[in-house]
Every structure is written in structure tokens, then in C-alpha cells.
Amino acid sequence: MRKIIIDTDPGIDDAIAILLALSAKKELDVLALTTVNGNVDVEKVTKNACKILEVAGRTDIPVYKGNDKPLVRARINCEEFHGDDGLGNAGAEDSEKEIETEHAVDFLIRKAEEEKGELTLVPIGPLTNIAQAVQKDSGFVKNIQEVVIMGGAEHGGNMSPHAEFNFWTDPEAAKIVFQAGFRKITMIGLDATSDVFLSPTLRELLYLINTPISRFIHKMTRVYADGHWEIEKKLGCELCDVLTIAYLLDSSVAETVDAYVDVETSGLCDGASVVYRTFYYPDKKQNCKVAVSADTKKFFEIFFGYLFPEYREFALREL
Ligand code: RIB
Ligand code: CA
């Protein structure tokens, strides 16, 4: 059983990632959700974290509110993809759940100390909270077993030709995290997440499965799919954050390469993750693994296998 903390900006794909993590009861122990400004502002993001736990019947999991803006830059958000409320305006009920009073960054530092090397961090939003924990506590990095990040890209971007949203939003934070010296970082970027699109057919299957969770995902992803069509003329929606959880459950779902990654914080390629594959650049000291592709079939085997096991075969027939 792996102990994880998901640092998140729900966010539609964040919500689906959290639901998948919670369905893997034997494999993952979700200790808490920590929230950060990203897809929408941190107030909405934090309310959304509680709503998601309500839908999953897991309001026992604590939620800690984090940074309301990047380390040094102005706040940006992404309502066009995630809707004004951040969950696809799908009408998710407000939750009575109280959030914790401790700031997310102080919690991350405290929990890392308590769990002493047994903790995996899963940041699936901008890296502001993680970077601030590195800055605030000299022992934080060595107390963390592994970091599995959704962010960046070896090639391309979704906010500029070279920058992915989570790194684009707070490049200074991303740079700090990759330079901090964590024992093990895996960067799940757009090169791999572009292989995990929820197709209209699979989205329809979610509707027909007709459970509260399947219908919740179906409703939320309407806005997400509309955004992919209007902005990128892509059919379906990219389950970016969900791939980090699938990777935790079965790392063979993604092909990774050893790399040295640094993040640009100014100029034309601001927010870009510059990926030096150490095979080609042996003078660079490896600081992470980078996912360069994902196995679509295996991903949906995991997705439906954990969330809707009796429909796994139906889903695989459609791939
Ligand atoms: O670029 C994709 C990332 O940006 C995902 O984490 C999504 O939730 C958005 O935050
Ligand atoms: Ca996210």
C-alpha cells in the first residue's frame, strides 16, 4: 500500500484522477488532498476537492488549502477548459465538509517528516505548494520517497508551442522542484498524456453505466470535450492527470526515459520543460524520468478495471 498526497487544482481531469486513486483501495492510501491555484482559483479548487470526496463517499480524507497564486507571477486560470466552477459546471453539490485550518505547505512539511521517506507526492497542478515546501524546510526533499508529476512536455505545449499549463502557470516553482534533488521524480507530460483521450464512445459508455460516479464524470467532461473541440479541434478529452494515477498503479502504462529536466522562466520559451535525455547528453546529471508515451489500451484497462470493473471488457472492445 503506497501512501500518497495528491496536490491538485480540480479541475475536471484532477477530479477523475482523484476518483481513480480512491477506487484503488488496496494499492493507494490517499492521506490527504492539498489544493493550489490553477485551473480555477484556490477557493473554488478547495471547494471542488471537497465535492469530489463527497461524490466518492470519502469525506474522511482531509483537505488542506494552499497557495492562491504562483510564487512570483500573477495568477492565471483555465475556465475555458474546466468551466467557471472548475468541474465543468456539472452542478456538483456543495459539500458540508470542513477544510483543515493548517496551510497546505505546512501540512506537506509536517506529514513528510512524520512519514519519513514513506510518502509519495502526486502534484497534478502548478507546483507552487511543493516548491514552497522545498524553500521552507531543508529536510523536506529527503523525507519524500517519490514525486510523480503531471506537467511539462519533451515536445510541444498546450499554453504556448513549448509550455504545458502546470509549468506555464508557475515556471519558477517547477524549476525549484526539478533542481531540488528529490530521490525520484517521474514527469508525466503531454507526450504521454496525448495517448490517453476519453473518446466520445467511451464517454457514452460512462453515461450508460449509470452510476453516480460514472454520471459525474460524464457530466463534467461535456465542458472539457467542448473545450478540446473549440480550442484544438480534438474529439474527446485528454485525461492528463489521470495518467499519473494509472502510472502509480502500473508503471508499465507509460514508457519513460532517464533525463535531466530544467524549466525556462523567461523569454520566448517561458514555462518550457527542457528535456535532456541522458542517453544523448551523458554530461547532464539525471534528475528524473520522463514519460514519452502511454499505452492507451493498458490505460483504459486500468481506468475501467478499477472504477467500473464489470464494464472493462465493453470498454476494451471500443479501443
Ligand atoms: O496541462 C494539463 C494540466 O493542466 C492538468 O493538470 C490539468 O488539470 C491542468 O491543470
Ligand atoms: Ca490539474
Image (cartoon, rainbow, N blue to C red):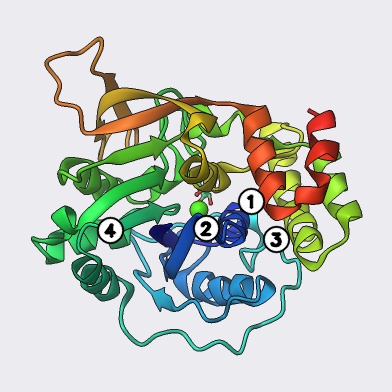
Of pointers 2 and 3, the one earlier in the residue sequence:
2
Q: Confirm whether residue 160 shows in the render.
A: yes
**Is residue 18 placed above or below 300 in the rendered structure?**
below
**Residue found 45% across the figure and 52% down from its top:** 124
The total of numbered circles placed on residues is: 4
**Residue found 62% across the figure and 36% down from its top:** 299
Of pointers 3 and 1, the one earlier in the residue sequence:
1
> Where is residue 153 drawn, in percent x and y?
42, 30
The residue lying toward the viewer, choosing from 293 and 69, is: 293
Q: Which dot marks residue 118? A: 4
**Does any atom of ligand 1 lie closer than 8 Å to the CB of label 2?**
yes
Mark 1 sits on what residue? Answer: 81
> Where is residue 163 drawn, in percent x and y?
41, 35
Asked whether disc 2 touches disc 3, contact meaning CB atoms under 8 Å apart, the reply is no
- Amino acid type, mark 2: Asn
Mark 3 sits on what residue? Answer: 88
Asked whether disc 1 touches disc 2, contact meaning CB atoms under 8 Å apart, the reply is yes
